[in-house]
Image (spheres, rainbow, N blue to C red):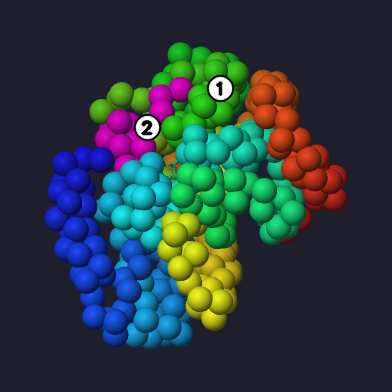
Amino acid sequence: MNLYKKLFALILIPPVLLLSGCSHARQPRIIRIGHNQSTSHPTHIALAAFQDYINGHLKGRYQVELYPSELLGSQTDMVQLTQTGAIDYCIASNAILETFSKNYEIFNLPYLFASADSYHHAMDDPSITTPIFTATQKAGFTAVTWLDAGTRNFYTVSKPIESPADLKGLKIRVQQSPTNIEMMRLLGGSATPMGFGDVYTALQSNIIDGAENNEMALTDNGHGDVCKYYSYDMHQMVPDILIGNNAFIQSLTDEERAVFEEGYRLVNQVQREEWVKAVDAAREKAASQQKVEFLYPDQAPFVKACLPLHQSVLQNNPAIRPIYDAIQKYNTRYPSDTE
Ligand code: GCU
């Protein structure tokens, strides 16, 4: 967490906590939700819908406040704040959650899903997500819904990536997850893990040669101002996850819980509708204004390099094997993109 964000957290949160702790019974309980995207991003738009829904349906009892743009720190910082109850919810990439429960490793596997259809159907299937979403009970938080974060692809400042061989010698930013670091090793690049908010400066100052993410990173985070090649190797579909503090969730009455659950459903629905529009707009803007060139390499060599990771993760964590097998059934049913 950089200095001004730390100061923000220190200055802002304690008085708010103090207020909610000593508040008169009729004062609404403030619910703080942090995330790392801009206010025009689908994530924020979906959380704003949640905010309206909860504030409207539980008026006087709860008041949702949103903290976008890493105001409360990096995703890892925000997960820790959610664990302790300093904030109530945050959005975290599935990638960083694997350090809190190994079960999250599954959705970080490269080339896990055969298509966006397979990904969406699997993520909508509670028999697949529940064992993962409830795996962090002991860590103090629970996942309440997922958000689409599209497909992750490599993008670079100056060297187009047409095959894994092109990654050799390049420093590529990855999310802070052992699975991602291993994926980069298998692909031949040099993994440089760091938080999302540090990537732009690292690209600009040549600390890294590229990164990997969905198209929104080019436009919404300005990475396309620096990186001119975006290669659709389609290595991962990593969902974002809305997590909530356990003690807070358990404090809700049955009636309130039902309202919150409808709110979580709304987050998922609104975010996914907005996502489709936002990605189209990002591609258009990146190509026309930022002059990013989109490349479509043969994916087969990337897939071949990454596949050993499936076996090693399953061997080290046999508990996720049934989930992996269930996902294969969706892959058989939805082998290529039809949406
Ligand atoms: C995407 C994802 C974020 C994540 C970011 C990253 O933008 O939606 O949750 O933090 O990638 O690469 O760190």
On the image, the x and y values in percent for residue 24 come to 24, 80
Closer to us: 27 or 3: 27
The relative height of residue 13 versus residue 233 in the rendered view (above or below) is below
**Which residue does the image show at 54% across and 81% down from the upper left?**
255
Tell me which amino acid carries mark 2: Met
What secondary structure is found at the residue carrying circle 1? helix
Q: Which residues are magenta?
A: 191-204
Question: From mark 1 to mark 2, how far is it between C-alphas?
Answer: 15 Å
On the image, the x and y values in percent for residue 339 come to 72, 59
The relative height of residue 151 versus residue 184 in the rendered view (above or below) is below
Earlier residue among tags 1 and 2: 1
The residue that disc 1 covers is: 182
The residue that disc 2 covers is: 194
Closer to us: 328 or 63: 63
Looking at the image, the residue that sits furthest to the top is: 169
Closer to us: 174 or 290: 174
Image-quadrant location for residue 63: bottom left
**Which residue does the image show at 54% across and 55% down from the upper left?**
143
- Circle 2: is it few (<14), some (14-19), or many (20+) Cα within 10 Å? some
The answer to whether the residue bearing label 2 lies less than 8 angstroms from the nearest atom of ligand 1 is: no
What secondary structure is found at the residue carrying circle 2? loop
The answer to whether the residue bearing label 1 lies less than 8 angstroms from the nearest atom of ligand 1 is: no
Q: Are marks 1 and 2 in contact (CB under 8 Å)?
A: no
Tell me which amino acid carries mark 1: Glu
On the image, the x and y values in percent for residue 167 come to 52, 20
Please say whether residue 151 is visible from this viewpoint: no
On the image, the x and y values in percent for residue 107 come to 62, 41
Q: From the image, which quarter does the N terminus lie in?
A: top left
Instruction: Let me know if residue 197 is in the magenta part.
Output: yes
